Image: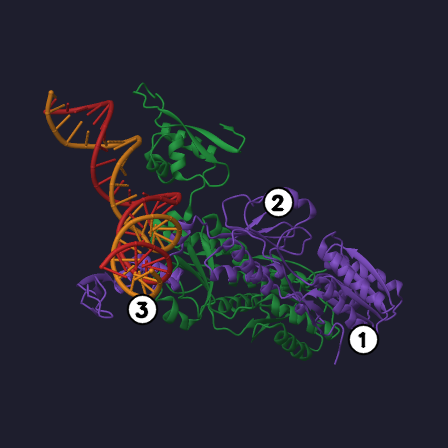
Chain colours: A purple, B green, C orange, D red
Amino acid sequence: MFKDAMNTLYYLVGEGRNDVNGYKSRAIIRWEVREEGVTMATLSDVAKKAAVSKMTVSRVINHPDQVSSELRELVYAAMKELKYVPNFAARALVHNRTQVIKLLILEEMDTTEPYYMNLLNGIAMELDKHHYALQLVTRNSHSIGDCDGLIITGMRADDYRQIIDPMDRPIVLFGQTDRAYDFVDVDNERGIRMATEHVISLHFTNILFFGISLDEPFMMARIRGFTETVLHHGLYGKVICMKNSSRAAQIEATKQLAMLQGAATAIVCASDRLAIGVVRAVLEMGLAIPRDVAVTGFDGVFLDRVSYPKLTTVRQPVIEMGQECAKMLLNKIDLDGARIGSRIFQPVLIVRESTWRP
Amino acid sequence: MFKDAMNTLYYLVGEGRNDVNGYKSRAIIRWEVREEGVTMATLSDVAKKAAVSKMTVSRVINHPDQVSSELRELVYAAMKELKYVPNFAARALVHNRTQVIKLLILEEMDTTEPYYMNLLNGIAMELDKHHYALQLVTRNSHSIGDCDGLIITGMRADDYRQIIDPMDRPIVLFGQTDRAYDFVDVDNERGIRMATEHVISLHFTNILFFGISLDEPFMMARIRGFTETVLHHGLYGKVICMKNSSRAAQIEATKQLAMLQGAATAIVCASDRLAIGVVRAVLEMGLAIPRDVAVTGFDGVFLDRVSYPKLTTVRQPVIEMGQECAKMLLNKIDLDGARIGSRIFQPVLIVRESTWRP
DNA sequence: AGCGCAGATGTTAGCGGTAACAGATTACAC
DNA sequence: GTGTAATCTGTTACCGCTAACATCTGCGCT
C-alpha cells in the first residue's frame, strides 16, 4: 500500500484467496485505486480485501460461528485494516426497522427537571451504543412516525385503555404497574422505609410524611413504607399529601410545625422538591436543622445537593434505570415483543446535613 | 374498500390511470389483498394506488414542481389514503448519509447540570423534526462512528488545532469564537451590562463582579460588559474570578463582604451557580437580601428558581439556541458545508427577589 | 414531412446490507 | 466406491428510495 503524488491510496487486493491448506490457489492479483478518506469502507470493500464474498463478511459480523476460523481471521484483519464500520441505515432497511425508540412522557414534565434529564441520559446512552435513535414524544405526538419500540413513563390509570394497550409495538414502562407489562422501577417502599428508620434511629418521635397527592402505585408504595415502619416502632406518624411543589410543602410545613409548637420533628418527604420547601419553612421559622427539625427527601438527583443545608435523601439510580429500560426494550424487540420480566432497583440512603451533623 | 371476516382490507387499485384529457385509457382494474396495519405503506404502494411509477411519487415528494399538477394531486390523495410515511433509512442509504449529528462537549460536563439538559433538548427537538439522530460524544469518543455533522461546545484554544480544524464534516460551534467557524451564542456583554445597569439603578455603589476563571471569549465579553458599564457610571467596580462552583463563590463572598463591613453591596455573577454561593454567604453572615446585598446571576436555567430567595438573572434562551444550532447545521449540510454566518441571541433580564422586593 | 426541442414520465441500476437458497466440500457409514 | 448428511461458502434477490438516463409526447420551425 503506498501513496502517489495525487494523494491516492493504492491497495493490493486479491481476487481469490491465496494458497491455503494445500488447496489449489485461485489468487489473481490486481490493483485497485481508491480515494483516501473520502468514502468509508463498505462490506464489499472488506470482502474484496479478504478475498471472500460479501456474505461471508456479513456472517462474520452476525453469525461468526458459521464461518471457519480461518476465513474469520482473514475477514477480521481486513475489517481492521480498512477501519470498517457497518452502515446501520442499510441494516435497518433490510430488517424493516426504523432504529427509532420513542420515549413517551405522559405526565406533565418540566424539561428542566434534572430527574428527567438523567433518565433521558441513561436511555440515550444505552440506545446510542446499539445505534438506536431516541425520539421524545408526548400524549399528543406519540403516534407521529414509526418506531421499533417505546419506553413510557408517567402513565395514569386511564392511559392504559386509551394509549398503552392499543400500541402494537414492544413497550417497557418506567414506573411500576400491576398490569401485564414489563417495567423498571426503584423499590419505593423500601426507600421510604430506610428514610423513616433513619430518623427514628436519631430518636425523633414526632414523624410526618409529606406525600404527593397522586393515586399511583409508586405513591401508595411510599406511603406504605412510611406507615408500616412507624407502626412497627409503635410511634405516631401523620401522612399529609400535596402537589409536588416546594411552595406547597413550605406552606404545609409551616402549618404543621406551628401546631407542634417547637417539638423536635422529623419530616420524611416523598421528593427532594417537597423537602426543599420544608427546609425553607424551617429556616423561616427560625428553627434549626437538624436539631429541631430533620428532613429527608427522595430522588437524589441534583436538588438534594443545591439545597442548603444539603438534603439527606433516598437516591434512585436514575441513569442506570434509564439504561436498563433501554436494554430491556432492545431485548424485547429482538425477542419479538415477548414478556421478559421487570427489574426493581434498590435505592440508597444518602445521609447529609438535613438530618445529621457530625 | 371493505373488510372481510379475516380482518383483511381489500383495496381497489388501477393498473393504469383512467381516461384523462381524452388520452386513450389504459385502466385495467384488479383487486389486491393487504393485511391491515401490519406493514407500513411504501412508495411502491402509493405508486400503484395512484397508477403512476415509483419515480413520479418520489418526485412529488422531492421535486414537486417537476410533476404535472394533475398527477401530483393524484399522488397526494394516494399518500393520504395510505397514510404514507417515507422511510428515512432508505433515503439515507441512497444519499450516503448517516442521519447522525454528534454533539461534542469538550468541557467537563456535569450531566446533572440543567444548562446542558436544555441545550440538548433544543438540539434534539429540532433534529428530530428532520429525522436526524443525536449522538453525545466527548473528547475521547468523538471519532467513533460516522456522522453528517457536529455541534461543538466548550472548546478551548488548544482544541482548534487538535480536534476542530481536522474535522472533515460540517460544524456549528455553540459559543462565540473569533475563528472562521459558524457559531451560536448569546450576547454575553450585553447580558452583564443589563444586570449591572439594573443594580446601579437600585442605587448600589459598591459593585463586585464574580467571574469564572476561564480565558474564553464568553468570559472576556462578560467582564467587558461589567467594567464598561461601571466605568460609564463613574463607579468603583471590582472583578474577582474563581472556578464555577457555589462553594468557591460562598467563600469569596464571605471574604469580600467582611472587608466591606456591612456596606450595601451588589454582586453581579457570571453564573447562577456562583450567585447561589453568594446568597448562602450573605444569609450565613446574617445580612439581608436585597437590602444589604443584591445578587444577580447568569443563565436562567433552573438554578435561579430553586434558589431562595429566587435569583435575579440574565436568561439565555438556551432551548431556542439549541434549536438554532441544529437548524444551522442541517442547513450547512444541505449547502455542502459552506459558511452560513453566526447567530447571536439577545438575553433577557429577569428581576426577582435577590435584587428587588415589591 | 421531418427536424430539434422541452417537458413529463418511466426504466434501470445501485446505495449497503441480509435472508434464503444453491453449490461445493468434507466426513462418515455401508 | 457410493450415498448422505453436515458444514462451509457463494449467488441471487430484495429492503425503500433516488440519480441518471431513456422514452415519449406535443409543439414550433424550416
Q: Are marks 3 and 2 on the same chain?
A: yes
Picture disc at residue A202: 1
Q: What's the chain of the residue with tag 2? A: A
Instruction: State left or right for residue A53 relative to residue A123.
Output: left
Q: Mark 2: which amino acid?
A: Asp
Answer with the quarter of the image where residue B307 lies.
bottom right
Between D2 and A302, the one lying in front of the other is D2
Of circles 3 and 1, the one toward us is: 3
Q: Quadrant of the C terminus of chain B?
A: bottom right
Q: What's the chain of the residue with tag 3? A: A
Q: Which residue is mark 3?
A: A70
The percent position of residue B113, horizontal first and vertical second, equals: 58, 65
Q: Is the residue marked by circle 2 packed among few (<14), some (14-19), or many (20+) residues within 10 Å?
A: few
Asked whether the viewer can see residue B264, the reply is no
The percent position of residue B226, horizontal first and vertical second, equals: 55, 67
Q: Are marks 2 and 1 on the same chain?
A: yes
Of circles 2 and 1, the one toward us is: 2
Q: Secondary structure at mark 1?
A: loop
Q: Which residue is mark 2?
A: A165
Q: Mark 1: which amino acid?
A: Leu
The percent position of residue B274, horizontal first and vertical second, equals: 61, 70
Q: Mark 3: which amino acid?
A: Glu
Q: CA distance from mark 3 to mark 1?
A: 67 Å
Q: Residue at x 65, y 68 (%)?
A: B276
